[in-house]
Amino acid sequence: MAISAETTEETLVARAAAGEEAAFARIVAAHHQDLHRVSFLICGDLDLTDEAVQRAWVVAWRKLGSVRDAGRLRSWLVAVAANEARQVLRSRGRRAIRELDVAEHEPAGAGDPAGRSDDLDLTNALSRLSIDDRQLLAMRFVAGFDSFEIGRVTGRSASGTRARIGRLIARLRRELGDD
């Protein structure tokens, strides 16, 4: 059965939950990049990220029928991906090694070496945060969730979520010398 362009997300979720692969493929197409970005911030490694996202889609396929409010599908999917990213990291019991593609970078002194250095400093500072803290930052700054949505997913209050994110930002600023 073909899905029309007018199909609402609620109908799409219902059809996918009933086993319609085309409906699920549309959900994947609409949300895959969000899941990938959030998982990458948590994992910090492309291979682990890919594994986490793949596992998240398997969970989503199995449990899509449990989504009560299709309007919250995106936040539910991101939460599933964040949980799977955390599980992948825990099961690996190791820190990710960051690869730098030297061939892509210009010779020393060319371009903006300070910008690349700042990116690497931020990446390293993020990698020193706990998995839970990276999840909060990913949900806020990558997925764009507000404190109420994050709180609903993580079991925190909205004010507690805002306070925790504020402390994390302050910590990152101190580590990066951006006070």
Image: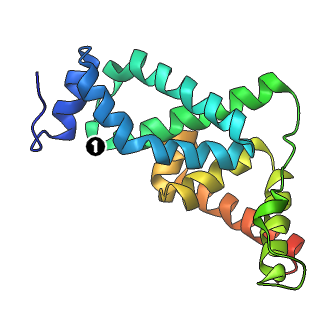
Secondary element at image label 1? helix
| Residue 120 can be seen, yes or no | yes
Left/right placement of residue 149 relative to residue 173 reads left
Q: Measuring from the top left, give residue 31's x and y in whole percent.
A: 40, 43
Q: Mark 1 highlights which residue?
A: 71
Q: Measuring from the top left, give residue 85's x and y in whole percent.
A: 66, 34
**Residue for point 83% across, 82% down:** 114
Q: Measuring from the top left, give residue 117's x and y in whole percent.
A: 85, 73
Structural crowding at the residue carrying mark 1, measured as other residues with C-alpha within 10 Å and reported as few (<14), some (14–19) or many (≥20): few
**Residue for point 71% across, 33% down:** 48
Whether residue 96 is situated above or below residue 145 in the rendered picture: above
Colour scheme shown: rainbow
State which quarter of the image contains the N terminus.
Answer: top left
Left/right placement of residue 105 relative to residue 161 reads right
Q: Measuring from the top left, give residue 64's x and y in whole percent.
A: 35, 23
**Residue for point 56% across, 52% down:** 139
| Residue 173 can be seen, yes or no | no
Q: Nearer the viewer, residue 23 or 179?
A: 23
Whether residue 106 is situated above or below residue 135 in the rendered picture: below
Left/right placement of residue 98 relative to residue 136 reads right
Q: Nearer the viewer, residue 2 or 164?
A: 2
Left/right placement of residue 90 relative to residue 97 reads left
